[in-house]
């Protein structure tokens, strides 16, 4: 089949959750013998310029540069609009011109959107192509902002975040009904959309990982004490909200004693104020060169998320590395886990504290949880099996 994969960010290099999930689809389809062309929005002005020649050739990669930064006046004006600010940022002439050019010169069987944000292009696609249109939802996008709004203490910020959530919800549910098929990254998200009366056929299609291509990194440094770690992009608000909560409500809480442990925090775009938490038992690394090696060098991963949706790719990577993970219920959404068997679920500060001690004081239990987590990934997130399911969905459409 001939497939056009449209991405709201460059899928290469696959160094964070979204690109990792997109690239798994790209590579899986190519390895299965299908033709994949990638069109991506590049807001960073660098990712597409680092592409290996082989990737460029196989995907006929093209991109459109868009400045996605939100200006204060733009945000203020949007308060009086029913349009989603997050979607409107993408609507530039260069993107319309690029998709028109591609569709006038090539034919496709499937046009596959990664996330909803560029799906406003559906009308122009219908004009120039007979391809079936699929939207892969990485999250319930508006739900992220609704949760952020509910957790916000500042009244003005709460009002604004609710506006963001409501306008995004209006767009999200409307645009999903214009596609021919929906692929939700978790069955939980798929069921949510069905309950919101989305009429387009929806299939839960989990994130896949190539188990053969990723080797478990070996520890190459030794921490002085048993160590917790957090890793994730810190320009994504749910990650920042979560680690700030953990630092204030758990790690530095006076009545919790974690003096015998270390905490290591890594992430792209680490804000300057987070370094204020650094001390002899709290290390702020900023961006690290090798995320899997960083995971290998520490013992237990924490995922204190309260506002996310979809599935956390970093948890799947940690499971693949046979790492024990402590997560909130929100953080572990979309995983077919058993609490206490392959992950520890903690939805308040005391539960986090108890879980930390239970794992870092018992190396054998920590190892057993990690082994079970690896098996969970092997059973439910094998990319070869997931790609076969995806191809079957394409053929049915």
Image: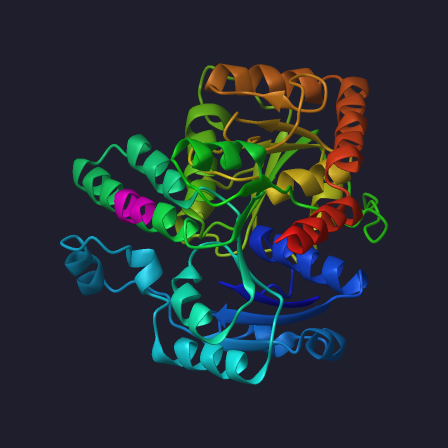
| Horizontal arrangement in the rendering, residue 157 relative to residue 314 (left or right) | left
Image height of 187 relative to 272, above or below: above
Q: Tell me where residue 357 appears, x and y as whole percent.
A: 64, 17
| Horizontal arrangement in the rendering, residue 358 relative to residue 193 (left or right) | right
Image height of 23 relative to 293, above or below: below
| Horizontal arrangement in the rendering, residue 195 relative to residue 371 (left or right) | left
Which is more toward the observer, 360 or 44? 44
Colour pattern? rainbow
Q: Assess whether residue 166 is covered by the magenta stretch.
A: yes
Q: Tell me where residue 339 appears, x and y as whole percent.
A: 64, 18
- In the rendered image, is residue 223 in sight? no
Q: Tell me where residue 90 appears, x and y as whole percent.
A: 37, 67
Q: Residue at x 57, y 78 (%)?
A: 62
Q: Is the magenta stretch mostly helix, strand or loop?
A: helix
Q: Assess whether residue 216 is covered by the magenta stretch.
A: no
Q: Residue at x 75, y 57 (%)?
A: 28
Identify the image quadrant of the C terminus. bottom right
| Horizontal arrangement in the rendering, residue 295 relative to residue 233 (left or right) | right
Which is more toward the observer, 305 or 248? 305
Identify the image quadrant of the N terminus. bottom right
Image height of 291 relative to 72, above or below: above
Which is more toward the observer, 299 or 201? 201
Q: Tell me where residue 213 appears, x and y as whole percent.
A: 83, 54
| Region rendered in magenta | 164-170
Image height of 143 relative to 80, above or below: above
Tell me which corner region of the image, top left, top right, bottom left or bottom right, holds residue 319: top right
């Amino acid at each position: 089949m001939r497939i056009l994969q449209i991405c709201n960010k460059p899928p290469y290099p696959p160094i964070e959750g979204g690109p990792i999930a997109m690239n798994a689809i790209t590579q899986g389809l190519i390895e299965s013998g299908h033709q994949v062309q990638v069109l991506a929005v590049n807001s960073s002005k660098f990712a597409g310029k680092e592409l290996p020649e082989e990737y460029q050739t196989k995907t006929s990669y093209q991109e459109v540069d868009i400045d996605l930064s939100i200006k204060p006046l733009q945000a203020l004006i949007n308060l009086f609009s029913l349009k989603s600010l997050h979607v409107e940022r993408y609507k530039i002439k260069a993107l319309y011109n690029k998709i028109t050019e591609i569709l006038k010169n090539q034919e496709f069987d499937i046009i596959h959107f990664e996330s909803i944000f560029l799906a406003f292009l559906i009308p122009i696609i219908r004009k120039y192509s007979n391809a079936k249109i699929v939207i892969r939802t990485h999250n319930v996008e508006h739900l992220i902002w609704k949760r952020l709004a509910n957790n916000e203490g500042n009244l003005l910020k709460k009002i604004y975040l609710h506006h963001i959530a409501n306008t995004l919800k209006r767009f999200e549910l409307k645009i999903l009904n214009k596609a021919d098929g929906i692929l939700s990254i978790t069955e939980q998200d798929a069921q949510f959309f069905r309950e919101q009366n989305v009429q387009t056929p929806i299939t839960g299609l989990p994130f896949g990982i190539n188990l053969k291509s990723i080797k478990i990194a070996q520890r190459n440094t030794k921490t002085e004490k048993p160590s917790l770690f957090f890793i994730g992009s810190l320009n994504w608000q749910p990650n920042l909200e979560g680690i700030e909560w953990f630092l204030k409500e758990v790690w530095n809480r006076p009545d919790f004693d974690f003096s015998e442990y270390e905490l290591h925090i890594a992430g792209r775009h680490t804000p300057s104020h987070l370094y204020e938490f650094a001390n002899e038992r709290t290390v702020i690394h900023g961006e690290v060169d090798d995320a899997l090696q960083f995971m290998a060098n520490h013992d237990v991963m924490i995922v204190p998320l309260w506002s996310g949706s979809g599935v956390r790719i970093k948890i799947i990577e940690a499971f693949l590395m046979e790492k024990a993970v402590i997560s909130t219920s929100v953080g572990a959404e979309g995983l077919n886990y058993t609490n206490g068997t392959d992950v520890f679920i903690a939805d308040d500060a005391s539960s986090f504290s108890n879980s930390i001690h239970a794992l870092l004081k018992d190396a054998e239990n920590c190892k057993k949880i990690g082994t079970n987590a690896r098996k969970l990934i092997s059973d439910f997130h094998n990319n070869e099996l997931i790609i076969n399911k995806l191809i079957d969905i394409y053929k049915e459409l």
